[in-house]
Amino acid sequence: MALTIPAPRFRMQPDFPSAPALADALIVDPFYLAISVDHEHDMPQRKAVLADYFAYSLGEAARTGRFLAAEDERLGAAAWLLPRSEAVDAAESAAKSDYLAATLGPKGLDNYRRIVDFMAARSPAVVPGHAWYLSILGISPYAQGRGHGARLLAPTLAEADAAGAPCFLETFTPRSVAFYERLGFRGEAEHLEPVTNSAYLIMCRPPRP
């Protein structure tokens, strides 16, 4: 069943202590490098733009999905997007478009749109229409390997299982595949994304009894 949570009018995102950790953890991801390319010669600014992007995305997840932060929020967070009604989806999409235009540089904005369009056209072939989407998971590099990521995902995976909902994600990071497989995700399709010239894997997880 689609959510009917009303979306707010566009505003600057609230402060999320997890956002800088996400920027540190995901700065090497081809997608995030592509959308921050306008600041490729200024690493502090590049990370600041990404932290701002992550804060907005965590706010979107809090409104229309699930937002979970580590016990120490500065260590990382997970963001899920759940199926939305057409009205909520239209409002959120318009607000995000305004936000991205005001935040990313022109190259980054163009890259974002091209990458998202490419990926959105390919996921329906393997992803059920009512699946819950793990949009973001990131743990500060110095805190990785301590089980934070699995603990962040456990509550929402259990909730999805109880609701009989499948889940999916997309990853550009081969070393993360084994981690997701341990949680029940399986690779369904791999594509070469042309903007980043990088392969990414669509992984799906059926609900468990």
Image (cartoon, rainbow, N blue to C red):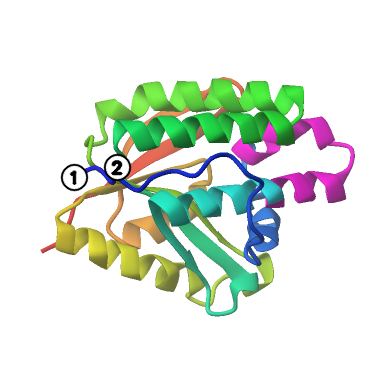
Q: Which residues are magenta?
A: 31-51
Quarter assignment of residue 36: top right
Quarter assignment of residue 112: top right
Q: Residues within 10 Å of mark 1 (few under 14, many from 20)?
A: few
Q: Is residue 177 above or below residue 103?
A: below
Q: Residues within 10 Å of mark 2 (few under 14, many from 20)?
A: some
Residue type highlighted by circle 1? Met
Would residue 132 appear left or right of 89 to someone viewing this image? Answer: left
Reading the image, the residue beneath label 2 is: 83
Q: Is residue 200 above or below residue 115?
A: below
| x, y percent for residue 51 | 70, 52
Question: Residue 72: which disc?
Answer: none
Q: Is residue 28 visible?
A: no
Q: Quadrant of the N terminus?
A: top left
Furthest-right residue in this view: 41
Picture residue at 14% right of the left edge, 55% below the top: 164
Residue type highlighted by circle 2? Pro
Q: Is residue 185 visible?
A: yes
Q: Quadrant of the C terminus?
A: bottom left
Would residue 182 appear left or right of 207 to someone viewing this image? Answer: right
Q: Is residue 20 magenta?
A: no
| x, y percent for residue 192 | 49, 25
Reading the image, the residue beneath label 1 is: 1
Which badge, 1 or 2, comes first in the chain's sequence?
1
Say which of 118 and 74 sits in front.
74
Chief secondary structure of the magenta span? helix
Disc 1, SS: loop
